[in-house]
Amino acid sequence: MSAVATRADCKPLRPAAVAAPSEAAALRANHRWKVLGIGVAANACFSATFSGIPATAVFLRSGYHLSNGELGLALGLLGLGVALSELPWGLLTDRWGDRRVLLTGLGATAVWLLVMAALVVPSPAHIPGIALLAAALLVTGLLGGSVNGSSGRAIMAWFGEGERGFAMSIRQTAVPLGGGLGALVLPSLASAHGFTAVFGLLAAASAVSTSLAWRWLHQPPAHDDANSGSMALSAGPVPLRNPAVWRIATAIGLLCFPQVAVLTFASVFLHDFAGMGTAVISASLAAVQVGAMVMRVWSGRYTDRHGNRRSFLRLCSLLSVVAFTVLAALVLLAAQFLSGQAPMLSPAMVAMLVVAGICVSSWHGVAYTELATLAGASQAGTALGLANSLVFIAFFLVPIAIPGLLVLCSWAGVWLGAAICALIAWPIFLPSSDGRKSA
């Protein structure tokens, strides 16, 4: 990005007058938390959509008369939509600015969910086909892909290097926060009131978040302290030509495969294999999201203080390997050796699923901070868009692959596959050969 383009994008908060350096610093200190709040709200709304809808998988399957394969396809296309749109939205964010992109994407998502509430819901007179449902979820993903890169770039602009890990981790708590709320509310809402209520509630949440962004999301003041200079500079090559950016983005994508397995099919696993009811399923998925939220805030502050982002990411990978391997062993034990007494192991399987889900969901803020730091704040939208394109490839592939894995090797194979993905991610988080360390 040229210096002229960067300068034009970073309009002052009060365009009628140029703020003095001390005034600009005060504006940044006071306003940055509002920007962070907007980032949290925007990500929570979309997380409630892409994590909350899969939490209703049992009711999707029955309400739309889907097989497991059709259910996986529909949920997978939601992830594919985000995967296809994240990088283009990220490039647009670096060119147009985070405000325009976030308002456009969030507003369009709200309108589209309202259309789905009116036209793409089962009723006694009509059951929408798999093609219509899958296409609708694909468009939802295409529009929602605007949220991550734009909100992340805004936070990188308003926060300095010594606090970005903490700020980005708080923003990333929005993903389990929104997912947890979706897991708690949407299954019961789908059961009692159908999918008109589900899509209508998600549309209303997106509309509220859009109004908050319209009111409070602005670029930092034109004149600022030393932190403003970091917004205009890149830390290295253009992100799409930077091998270090590609390494971290690839590892992020790989480590999301087991996380997506939990988000999309944990409800089916707990219902079909562990014999759990709606209350236990919702509570288990909410526990995963709350645990991940707490860990993300703690990890952001911890790695900011100790400068050990890569080490923390490798630790999360190894803990995920262990947790999913133990879960697979419990499933295998229940299926092969205690088939008549499998309910005895159900509490242990539920607990281990929660532990595994937290381990594989606690690293996002740290990883995204490391990635954005490598790319440079002014090009963070592109880097974050690249990473999330790979993340949502997982949201596309995993729901489609799981039904096939269930046929070939049951739930033990599914969770063992999750462990293998986490194991592959571990060495990629090692520092690159040029010796560059994380901040």
Image (cartoon, grey):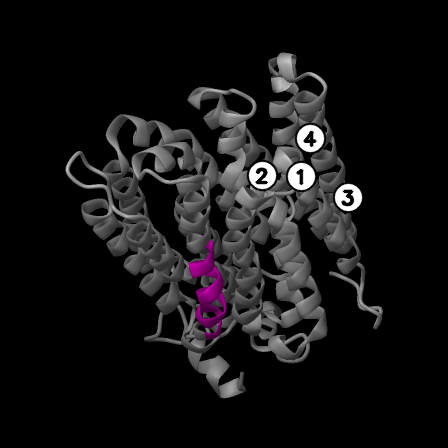
- Along the line of sight, which residue is nearer the eye, 119 or 31? 119
Q: Secondary structure at mark 4?
A: helix
Image coordinates of residue 380 in percent, x first then y, are 56, 68
- Along the line of sight, which residue is nearer the eye, 53 or 13? 53
Q: Which numbered mark, 2 or 4, is in the foreground of this view?
A: 2
Q: Is residue 178 above or below residue 245?
A: above
From the image, tell me which residue sits under label 2: 406
Q: Secondary structure at mark 2?
A: helix
Whether tag 1 and tag 2 are in contact, CB under 8 A, the answer is yes
Q: Viewed as shown, does residue 138 lie left or right of 33?
A: left
Labels 4 and 3: the sequence-earlier one: 3
From the image, tell me which residue sits under label 1: 413
> Which residue type carries mark 4?
Leu
Determine the residue positioned at 59% across, 74% down: 229
Q: Which numbered mark, 1 or 3, is in the foreground of this view?
A: 1
- Res 41 visible: no
> Which residue type carries mark 3?
Leu
Determine the residue positioned at 50% across, 69% down: 87
